[in-house]
Image (spheres, grey):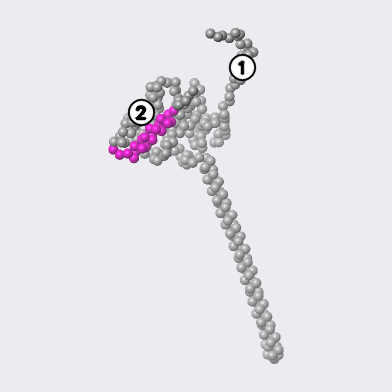
Amino acid sequence: MRHLNSGRKLNRTASHRRALMSNMATSLIISDEKRIKTTEAKAKELRPYVEKLISRACKAQQMEGPAGLHARRVVARLIKSKQAVQELFDAIAPAMGDRPGGYTRVVKLGTRRGDGARTAIIELVDFAAERDGAYSSGRSKKSRQAAEESMIEQTIGSAVEAMENAGDAVEEAVEDITDTVEEVVEEVAEKVDEVVSDNDESNEESTDDSEEDKK
Amino acid sequence: MAHPKRKISKSRRDKRRTHYKAVAPTTASCPNCNSVKLAHAACPECGYYNGRKVVETFAA
C-alpha cells in the first residue's frame, strides 16, 4: 500500500532524482522564456519544487540583513548555479509581486515521437503573461463570460428602464396638455357664457345699447 | 511447491483475454481551430490552450 508515500521516483535513485530536480529548476530559472519542455511526470514533480524556491525568494524580499542572506543560501543548496540563484532573487521574485503561490503553469502537449512519453511545458506564470499579449486577464473563461453577460444584462436593463421612463414622460406630457387644453376650453366657455349673459343682461336692460353695439 | 495440474487451454486463455481491451484516449475539439485534440492538452494544430497561444506549431 502507498500509505504516506507521495511523489514520483522517476526511475532514479535518490541522489539522481535530487540532481535532476536541481538541474530542471536551474534550466527553468535561467531560460530566457522562463519555460522548459519535459515529460508530464517530471513537470509535475518540478512544480512544487520550484514553487517552494520562489516562495522563499519572495519572502526574502521583505527580510532585512542576514535573514535574506540565509534564504539565499538555503536556495543555493538546492540549485547549484549561482547565476540561477541571482536570477531567482533579483529578477523573478520582484516580478512575482504578491502572488500567493501558483507561480508556475504546466500545459500538457501530447505524446512525443520515439518513446511515446507524454510531454508538457512548465513555465513561470508572470513571465508567460508578459510574453503573450493575448493573455492579459487572470480570470477564467467562465468568469469572463459571466462578466460579459452581466454587462449585457445591465445595459439592456438600463435601456429598458430609460424606455419606460421616456414612455411615462410622454404620457405625463400628454396628460398635462389635455389638462391645460381642457382648462383653456373651460375658461373660454366660462368667458363666452359671461359675455353672452352680459349681452343678455344689457339686452334686457337696454335694447338700444345692444343695437348700438351691433352697429 | 504447488503447480498447475493442467495446461490452460487456448480457449480458457483466450476467454480470459477478452477483457483485455485498449481504451481510446479522450478527445476534445479545439475551441480555436475546431480540430480534434487531446482533452486538457494544448492543441497540436494551432498551439492554443485555454484561449492563449502556448506553443508554436508547424501549421500555424
Q: Residue at x 53, y 41 (%)?
A: A142
The picture quadrant where one finds residue A72 is top left
Give percent across and percent down for residue A129: 44, 38
Q: Which mark is residue A130?
A: none
Is residue B5 shown above or below A113?
above
Are the residues under marks 2 and 1 on the same chain? no
Q: Is residue A32 visible?
A: no
Q: Nearer the viewer, mark 2 or mark 1?
A: 1
Viewport quadrant of the C terminus of chain A = bottom right
Label 2 sits on residue: A78
Q: Residue at x 30, y 34 (%)?
A: A69
Query: Please, what is the dominant secondary structure of the magenta stretch?
Result: helix
Q: Which mark is residue B16?
A: 1
Chain label for disc 1: B
Task: Give the residue type at disc 2.
Answer: Leu
Q: Residue at x 40, y 41 (%)?
A: A98
Task: Give the residue type at disc 1.
Answer: Arg
Is residue A97 shown above or below A18?
below
Q: Nearer the viewer, residue A161 or B37?
A: A161
Please tell me whether mark 1 sits on a helix, a strand or a loop. helix
Is residue A73 shown above or below B4?
below
Left or right: where does residue A133 sit relative to residue A58? Answer: right
What segment carries the magenta color? A45-65
Q: How many marks?
A: 2
Please tell me whether mark 2 sits on a helix, a strand or a loop. helix
The picture quadrant where one finds residue A65 is top left
Q: Nearer the viewer, residue A204 or A102?
A: A102
- Density class for disc 1 (Cα within 10 Å; few <14, some 14-19, many ≥20) is few
Q: Residue at x 34, y 35 (%)?
A: A89
Distance CA(mark 2)–CA(mark 1): 50 Å
Left or right: where does residue A63 sit relative to residue A130? Answer: left
